[in-house]
Image: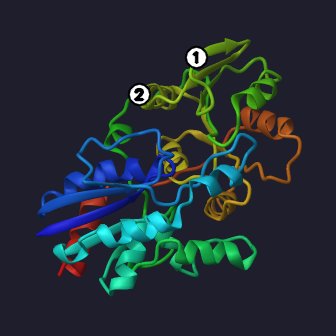
């Protein structure tokens, strides 16, 4: 059996999930990997056969997408050309983690594909979603369309939705609480964050930033470039995680029983939905409309956070079902 696994390269969550799924897929046959996008900070261990440009959302420094840089990276003629280069008919199973080039190539050529991603869960009306303008929902629906969907979310909202894929290195890590707080907000410049965090002087902060190449310490705030090993170590021993409205990062914190505060990116529909779902669980959220972050962060640090999430290790069973149900 030949399997094509296409992965979105914007953000780290898609790659992190793929690192768990690829070895499971390889038990069923030959797996070719395709990645499009250029905004991930982690890499796959396995060899990537197709590295495409795709459409990437470029993180800004003020809490949202950098629309100008995002627009500059878009190249529709190259997108169409790349669509035509993928030999889709060679594969018995095509899996897509919110990757648009393969998704649209399959749609144009009438080839079935399986959307295997967190975003796939949004096909269900049962998933919590805030009221929003229609174009945001249309982007989610048509960015990477598929024939079938298998989704992951914080809760099993529907029969095709499963709990998060938690990395083995997270499941197996030794958890402690050394009192510091870990921060990962890729769409916010550390130069903006540090002055805010310094106003809570009795807390030690460990900030991992996409916007610095050098580590430095400013008062009670330590800032480091993105480093997966150091981040995991910090997360395992922290009191809580302050992060964006992504999916995998918050899911890992919840799995480890850490306090969680999220600040979803502005105008990013998926992150708004994730934050909305977490808010329903009673977890704190900093929305774009919150101009003064300090009281919210202070309250989060000072107050206990009671939450229990059970994310069983069901990834192997999910992959087995996907292969049996959709391979041709």
**Residue 321 seen in render:** no
Q: Is residue 132 left or right of residue 29?
A: right
Name, please, the residue furthest toward the bottom.
110
- The answer to whether the residue labelled 1 contacts the one labelled 2, judged by CB atoms less than 8 Å apart, is no
Q: What element carries label 2?
A: helix
Q: Is mark 1 on a helix, strand or loop?
A: loop
Residue 51 drawn at (x, y percent): 34, 53
**The C terminus is located in which quarter?**
bottom left
Residue 135 drawn at (x, y percent): 69, 76
Q: Mark 1 points at which residue?
A: 215
Q: Name the residue under label 2.
A: 229
Q: Earlier in the sequence, mark 1 or mark 2?
A: 1
Q: In this view, does 186 lie to the left or right of 1?
A: right
- Disc 1 or disc 2, which is closer to the eye? 1
Identify the residue at horizontal 62%, vertical 53% (top origin): 72
Identify the residue at horizontal 67%, vertical 72% (top origin): 136
**Residue 295 seen in render:** yes
Residue 293 drawn at (x, y percent): 83, 39
Residue 323 drawn at (x, y percent): 21, 72
Res. 202 image quadrant: top right
Residue 289: mark in rendering: none
**In the image, residue 115 above or below residue 54:** below
Q: Is residue 3 left or right of residue 138?
A: left
Category of crowding for the residue at label 2, using alpha-carbon neighbours closer than 10 angstroms: few (below 14), some (14–19), many (at least 20): few
**The N terminus is located in which quarter?**
bottom left
């Amino acid at each position: 059996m030949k399997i094509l696994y296409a992965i979105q390269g914007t953000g780290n969550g898609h790659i992190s999930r793929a690192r768990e799924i690829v070895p499971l897929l390889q038990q069923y046959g030959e797996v070719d990997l395709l990645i499009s996008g250029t905004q991930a900070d982690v890499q796959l261990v396995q060899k990537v056969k197709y590295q495409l440009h795709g459409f990437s959302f470029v993180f800004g420094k003020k809490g949202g997408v950098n629309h100008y840089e995002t627009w500059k990276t878009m190249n529709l003629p190259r997108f169409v050309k790349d669509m035509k280069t993928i030999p889709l008919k060679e594969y018995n199973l095509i899996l897509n983690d919110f990757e648009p080039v393969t998704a649209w190539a399959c749609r144009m050529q009438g080839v079935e594909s399986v959307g295997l991603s967190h975003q796939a869960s949004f096909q269900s009306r049962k998933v919590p979603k805030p009221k929003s303008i229609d174009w945001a929902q249309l982007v989610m629906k048509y960015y990477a369309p598929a024939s079938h969907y298998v989704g992951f979310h914080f809760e099993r909202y529907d029969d095709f939705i499963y709990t998060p894929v938690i990395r083995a290195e997270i499941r197996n890590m030794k958890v402690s609480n050394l009192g510091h707080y870990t921060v990962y907000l890729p769409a916010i410049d550390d130069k903006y964050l540090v002055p805010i965090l310094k106003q809570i002087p009795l807390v030690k902060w460990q900030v991992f930033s996409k916007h610095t190449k050098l580590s430095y310490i400013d008062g009670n705030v330590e800032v480091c470039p993105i480093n997966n090993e150091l981040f995991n170590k910090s997360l395992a021993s922290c009191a809580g995680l302050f992060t964006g409205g992504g999916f995998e990062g918050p899911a890992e914190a919840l799995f480890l029983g850490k306090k969680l505060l999220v600040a979803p990116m502005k105008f990013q529909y998926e992150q708004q939905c994730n934050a909305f779902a977490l808010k329903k669980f009673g977890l704190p959220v900093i929305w774009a409309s919150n101009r003064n972050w300090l009281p919210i962060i202070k309250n989060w640090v000072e107050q206990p956070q009671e939450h229990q999430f059970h994310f069983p290790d069901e990834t192997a069973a999910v992959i087995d079902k996907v292969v049996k149900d959709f391979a041709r």
